Every structure is written in C-alpha cells, then in structure tokens.
Amino acid sequence: MHLPCPTCDRTNRVPAQRLLDKARCAACKGPLLPLDRAVPVASAEDFDELARDAAAPVLVDFWAGWCAPCRVVGPELEKVAAARAGALIVAKVDTEALPEVAGRFAVQSIPTMVLLRGGREATRLSGAMPAAAILARLGV
Ligand SMILES: [Zn+2]
C-alpha cells in the first residue's frame, strides 16, 4: 500500500502486513515505521490490502474535508494512533475520494469510526469524541 513519509512526504510502498515492523523512508531515510500515526488510505485497493493483511486491528476513520466535527476528531485519532502504536492501526478514508469504500460500510454520517478485526467490522462509533473516549468505547 502507499504510505506517505512523515518527514519528506514522499510515498513509500509498504506491504500492509509490515506496518508494525521497523522501516525507514526510501527517499530521506527518516523513520517511516512502525506506524504511530493515522495513515491516509490512497485507494480502494489499498483499503482492501489493509483490511485483509494488517497484523493488528484497524480503526477506520470515515471523514471529509467539509465536515467540522471530522476536523475535531482528526487530532484525537492521531493521539489514539500514538497511544496504541504497534497494537492498532488507524486509517483515514476520505469519503469524497473513496465513496465506494464508505458505501460498502453504509456510512450514513461522518465522522464514523469502524473497528475492523480480521477484516470484519467489530464495532463502530459515530460523532466526534476525545481520544480517551474512543479508546474506552472501542475497548482497544
Ligand atoms: Zn522521507
């Protein structure tokens, strides 16, 4: 899947099953993995790979640029990703860019957060809330 480098923003290609391994950026050699931040999903193909191959549960944030509560929950999800680095993958799906992925989960309102375990929906949360509430309500 496609993973932007947090240092130089160059896209690295990384197998989804390796997101919890250690890796450096191919361009700037800065730290790339393990994942300790929310990862933007670039395509439906990348989403499928992530859902199928991820070595940890995946928390998917369905959001859009025009959605004010999504902008509130974005930094909270970054905190969740940092707090659960190595144990949970946080992925962001832009519902405007990937409407087919949002459609598959019948996302009616945003922000909606769907927890995938083994590629299947385990829990979902709707609406903005602080990181501590997200972690408590998901039980992760
Ligand atoms: Zn880089």
Image: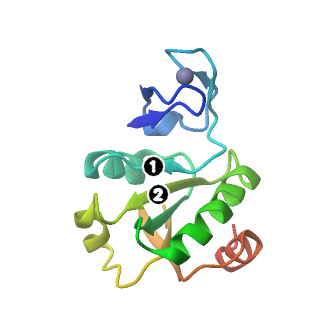
Q: Is residue 62 above or below residue 110?
A: above
The mark found on residue 40 in the picture is: 1
Image-quadrant location for residue 99: bottom left
Amino acid type for the residue under numbered disc 2: Lys
Quarter of the image with the C terminus in it: bottom right
Amino acid type for the residue under numbered disc 1: Pro
Quarter of the image with the N terminus in it: top left
Contact check, label 1 and label 2, Cβ < 8 Å:
yes
The mark found on residue 92 in the picture is: 2
- For image coordinates 64% across by 74% down, the residue present is 138
Say which element carries label 2: strand
Q: Is residue 108 above or below residue 59?
A: below
User: With 58 as the anchor, is 35 left or right in this view?
Assistant: right
- The answer to which of 62 and 52 lies nearer the viewer is 62
- For image coordinates 54% across by 25% down, the residue present is 8
Q: Residue 54, image x and y in percent? A: 48, 47
Badge 1: residue crowd in 10 Å (few <14, some 14–19, many ≥20): some
Image quadrant of ligand 1 equals: top right
Q: Nearer the N terminus, badge 1 or badge 2? A: 1
Image-quadrant location for residue 32: top right
- For image coordinates 72% across by 69% down, the residue present is 131
User: With 37 as the anchor, is 1 left or right in this view?
Assistant: left
Q: Is residue 108 above or below residue 84?
A: below
Q: Is residue 132 above or below residue 126?
A: above
User: With 68 as the anchor, is 130 left or right in this view?
Assistant: right
